[in-house]
Structure formats: structure tokens, C-alpha cells
Amino acid sequence: MGSKWRKAKLALGFNMCLYVPEKLGESSPSSSSAAINGRHHLDVVPSRFSSDAASTSPLSPPGIDCRPTTPTPSSSGLRLPKSGTRASKRTCAICLATMKPGQGHAIFTAECSHSFHFHCITSNVKHGNQMCPVCRAKWKEIPFQSPASDHPNGRLGINPVDWPREDNWMTVLRQFPPPRLDSSRQITSLFHAPEPGIFNDDEVLDQQNVTTEGNTLIKDPVCSDSIDTIEVKTYPEISAVPRATPHNNFAVLIHLKAPHRNGGQNSCGNQSTLASVSQNTRATVDLITVLDVSGSMSGTKLALLKRAMGFVIQNLGPSDRLSVIVFSSTARRLFPLRRMTETGRQEALQAVNSLTSNGGTNIAEGLRKGAKALVDRKWKNPVGSIILLSDGQDTYTITSPSGDRPRTNYKSLLPVSTHRDGGAGFHIPVHAFGFGADHDAVSMHSISEISGGTFSFIEAEGVIQDAFAQCIGGLLSVVVQEVSVKVECVHPEMQISSIKAGNYRTSMMADSRSGSVDVGDLYAEEERDFLVAVNIPVNGSSEEMSLLKVQCVYRDPITKETVSLEEASEVRIQRPAMVMQPEVSMEVDRQRNRLRAAEAIAEARAAAENGDLANAVSLLESCRRALSQTISAQAGDRLCTALCAELKEMQERMANRRIYEASGRAYVLSGLSSHSWQRATARGDSTDSTSLVQAYQTPSMVDMVTRSQTMVFGNPQSQRKLRQVQSFPGRPEPR
């Protein structure tokens, strides 16, 4: 009878402190008194969810006072009673079945210390119940289980109850059951151990995949272990020039397109994650995340950052390695470069979930430590990159070289290895993310420019995960490296007048007869466009003239071989005696529009920084009018339409000083970063319904962003969408 009464009381969840006699009728005066007067709430101190918190019962034996007791030493910091009945520890209060570890069921221990089968409690709370079924304490964190489609084994996690469920701010920061960890490596020691003087304690790469250069080679036994070659196309601005007429600054467009990944989902069968699919034919990654955990990141910002990092960790492959650096007033390394195996992921997730926010903002120190982690590493994956996120101004400043105002001179503070002009053929790109309205957009943009990375402006907090997803979607799809484009004049009297390649390093020989562009790494199906201007001389009596030879050289990350395209692309034009109406290249015109808009944005930004917002707006408006008169605009080209929309939005963000300081500067700088590198960046709050398909955003980025947006709960239509640079709709197929 006693057993039945106990089960009934547990099921009903009475919030009482009662003594249940072992046998019917064995009550005593003291127990009766406790039964009548013992309605005391357990004293619970809310804390982070912990699976190893002690499980306790609300029941107390005779003579035990039910008032709050001294906290027991536990990771959850709960105030727990010193004793409890064994039955409640062994029984799930929802299904009343036995609850023992190792029986194939995950066990959830709530912040109030009561334990349940995970599947029982997720069913109990999914309809809005946020209270413990036993003690009726209101939880600040509730368990959830994501659909099986999100992960082959399902995902388990927790959801802060004050977050809107339809916005899906939840992520997996724990998994059940946890993988068996190496007993010789305690997780706590990774988070708090003293840092070594040299960061050469990175985890060794998979030995069967290490080449003689120390790089990782991923081979798939079914798929081809090589990739297609880069596609090179050339377009002269017009098809014919009269032979008796010279033509200066004649534009030739060089268009590159990186190969797609072989061994994708269709050709190699189903894979559990995008990361494992892409590793068949991509370079593996060493990723350092440098994260701001200063006091301004408290609350929702830190929770969203943890969520975004959880997504990154889950999508790295087992041969990719991750290290996390956090900074506030100083910086510390949470753990060395670790392979993202199941064990590595678990430890990384626990490290990220342990973060708290306080202190100032020392971006420079965080970057120093992040660069050191890549420079000092003993083993090297082919791709090395840093992701930097901050929401504030760097409290460490030195005077800039111009002396105009105090500002951190990151170029002098960071190791030469981070500079894209640092020599030795090695640099560390820093992809910087300015978070919110108070970050230092100028410094963050400067960091990305110095290193060869991109700068993204995260205006709306809810899209941070999508912004990270877009970035790693690119990093996890590098298919060619060290790309270099070489151009050489064919006609003996012709010279190159300029090479317009944005931020990419260009060079020209002294005689102006040849030049080159260092492109670096390209993501799968990523495109680049460069405009080369040449001076065409008078051409005797020939009906045709060869202008340039274009050759592309790169390194295949799979075979580690240098590839030179056997047949160089040759640019030819007609040289008739007379030309009535030459055919104008739409491709050249649209790229001229792109460059014209980028130049206008740079000029407007300079005017705005000098306090002349009226002139800045006027420059953008003049460019918008000029674009509308071009042949591509008159033909209804979507690129030109999107460029005009982008310029208009920038005008609105320069309407006054307050708006410009709050969002205009960051929006403009992220746009300049995207244009300069021809690579997608995140901008704004992503709610613009007129956003067009972007050429800068690669299919790999689209896949990863889609994965980020579809792995969430709630109504998909209510979710915010990431907006990339608006000015680059997809290119039409070349004619």
C-alpha cells in the first residue's frame, strides 16, 4: 500500500514534504505532524542544466526538517537535501518506470535536482508546461528534442523558457548519452589548465591522411579523388575595332569559376552531414574562433553566440580542427586545436556552454592569441582561418599613424603572418563579424582588410547563426588554392594600362606587357571577375587581332599538385576597315557597373567620415542615375537593378549623423568588403523582401545557411532570413 501511495503522490506532484510510512497504519505523532504542517517549498537556486547533478526526492524521513539545507558540492550549485528515498531516485515520476543509467534511456536532471527519462520529460514540456512534475518549481531551462531529420541520431538539448519558441534560439549544447571520453584527458583541465608558452599542443591529424607536406588528404574510395579544372572565360568590351583607329583603355573581362565538388550527395550516396559530404573533395580546415565575452555580451547576446557556435561545431568534419579563444579585458584559450570527432565535439560544446560574460574588450589580445594558435601549431590542415566576433569598442588603443584620433593600429599589433602582404606565401585571413550597433566597424573592417578576410555586419541579433553558417559554408568548400591569373600581351605593340581586381594583389612588369592577379583560395563554384584595360594600336591590314593570353595556375588541395591549364585563353577581336555598330558585351558592361558602384560607395564613405553626409548622399545618387543610363540597365539587367537598390539603401543610412553612426557605417563597410573580395558578407537585418539571388553567395554557402534555418523549431515563415550583399544577382549564362 505504501508503494502505491508513493507512486500516486509522485504522479500527482504534490508540493509537500511528507513522510510516507513503510506500512499502512505505522504513522507516528511526529509523522502526522509533518504530514499536516510540512508544506514547505524546496529551496532551489536556478542554475545551468547539468546532467551530473544529484537526483533527490521531495520526500523526507521522520524527524528531518524540510527547510533549506546548505548547498552540496555539485556542478549545478543547487541547494539539495542531504538525503532522500531510494525509490524516487530509481523511478521516473512521469512513467513510474525504473530509471537506471545504461538501459538505453537518456536521463534528464532538472535544475531543481529531480530526474526523469528524457523522452518522458520532453513530451511533458512540449505543450507549454514549464514546471517540475514533482516539486512544481518553475524551470528557467526546459529540455527539447529536435526532429530526427536534423541529426541521424536525434538531438537533445535545453530551451530557456523565456525565449520565443518560434524564433528557435535553441541549439544543441549537450548530447545524450555523451560519448565515452578519454579517461586520461579531463574536460575541466582543458578549460582551466595554464596555457603553454608555445601553442604546439594541437591534436595530431589522422595519420593515414597526412601527406609529406603535413597537409591532410581526404580520399573517398568510391568518389573520384580529384576535381574538375577552373573555368576561364574572356570577354572583350566590343567585338570589333577599326584597324586604322587606336583604342586606349580597351576593357577585357576575365571570368573565373571554381569547380564544383565531386563526391557530393548525389554522386556518393547519402551522408549524415554536409561537412562529411564535402570532405571527400575539399581541403580540411583549422578554424580559430575569437569570441567577445565582455560584459556587454551578457544575456541574449551570449546565448545566441553559444547557439551559433554549437552550429559551427556540429558541422565541422572529424578531420577539421577547432580552437576557441575568448577575450574580455584579457584573452584565454579554452582548448587547443582539436579534431571535431564525436569526443572533440562534445568537449567543444561543453566549453562553449560554460562561457560567462564580464570585463572590458581587448580585441587585439584575442587576435594575438588566435594568430598564435595557427602560427605555433605542429600539424597543419590546408586551410587556416580565424573567425572574430565582437560587439564593442576595443578598450586597448594606440594612436593611429596619421595621428588623427586614438585607434588601435592592428597591423602593427598583429603578427606578420596575419597580413596578406606578409610574404612567405602564407597569411591568416580573419573573417570579422561586427555584432550590434555599438561595435567598432572601422577597426573590424581594418582587421579583415589587413588579413584578406571579410567583414560582416550583424545588425539583428537573431541572424548570428546564419551569418556564421554562410562563412563556414565557404571555408568548408575550398576546392582550389593559391590561384594565380597571368595575362600577357600578344601583339608586340600593345600594352596593359591597368588591372582592376579589387583587393586582390596585382602586379605588372616594367614594360607593361604582362601582369598577374593573386587570387588565393576559391570555394566550390565561386566566381571572380577582373577587368584588364589595354591600349590597342593601329593594325595594318589584318582582319583579326589577338590581344591577350590568359593563363591560370593553382594548387589542387586533394592531390597537392600544381595545375596549369594546358591551353591559355586567347582574346581576339575583329579589325575591319570600318565598323558600323560594334556588338557591346553585356558581361563587360555589368562588371563596369559593379566597379563604378564600388568606387562611388568608397568615395561616399570618405565624405561621410569627414562629416559631409550631404555630399556622400549626392555621390551615391549621381552613381545611381549614371547606372540607370547604361545598356545593361536599359536591358533590364538584374545586377544593375540590385546595385541601384543597394545605393538607395546606403543613402537612407546616411540620412543623418545618428543613423550613420548606428548602422550606416557598418553597412557601408561590409558592402565594400564584399565588393573588394567578391565574396558574400552578411549585412543588415535580412528582412528585405526584394533581396535577389546573389552571385557572391556560393551553392555551399546557400546549403549551409539553409541548414541553419531549417534545423530550428517553430513556424519557418516567422524566422529571420540572412540577407547578403544585395547588389549581385546570379550571372546569366555566357552567350
Image (cartoon, rainbow, N blue to C red):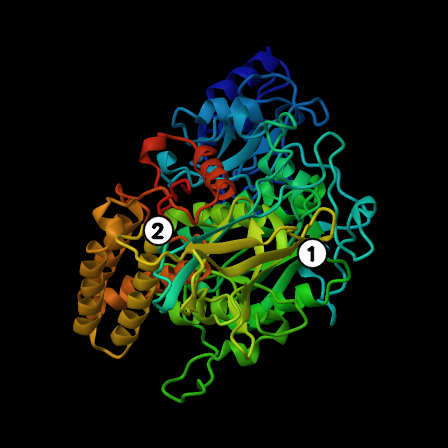
Q: Is residue 475 left or right of residue 681?
A: right
Is disc 1 surrounded by few (<14), some (14 to 19) or many (20+) residues within 10 Å?
many
| Camera-side residue of 135 and 366 | 366
Between discs 1 and 2, the one toward the N terminus: 1
Q: Would you say residue 354 is visible in this rendering? A: no
Q: Is residue 734 left or right of residue 704?
A: left
Is disc 2 surrounded by few (<14), some (14 to 19) or many (20+) residues within 10 Å?
some
Could you say whether the residue bearing mark 2 is in a helix, strand or loop?
A: loop
Q: Position of residue 241 (x, y in %)?
A: 35, 59
User: What quarter of the picture does the C terminus occupy?
Assistant: top left
Q: Would you say residue 498 is visible in this rendering? A: yes
Q: Position of residue 322 (x, y in %)?
A: 64, 53
Could you say whether the residue bearing mark 1 is in a helix, strand or loop?
A: strand
Look at discs 1 and 2 and give the one toward the viewer.
2
The amino acid sitting under disc 1 is: Leu
Disc assigned to residue 585: 2
Looking at the image, which residue sits at the far front? 541
The amino acid sitting under disc 2 is: Ser
> Which residue, given by chain and number where applicable, does mark 1 sit on?
337
How many numbered callouts? 2
Q: Tell me what residue is drawn at x 65 percent, y 19 percent.
A: 98
User: What quarter of the picture does the N terminus occupy?
Assistant: top right
Q: Tell me what residue is drawn at x 62 percent, y 75 percent.
A: 416
Image marks 1 and 2: residues in contact by CB distance under 8 Å: no
Depicted 267 relative to depicted 687: above or below: above
| Camera-side residue of 377 and 560 | 560
Q: Is residue 558 left or right of residue 545?
A: right
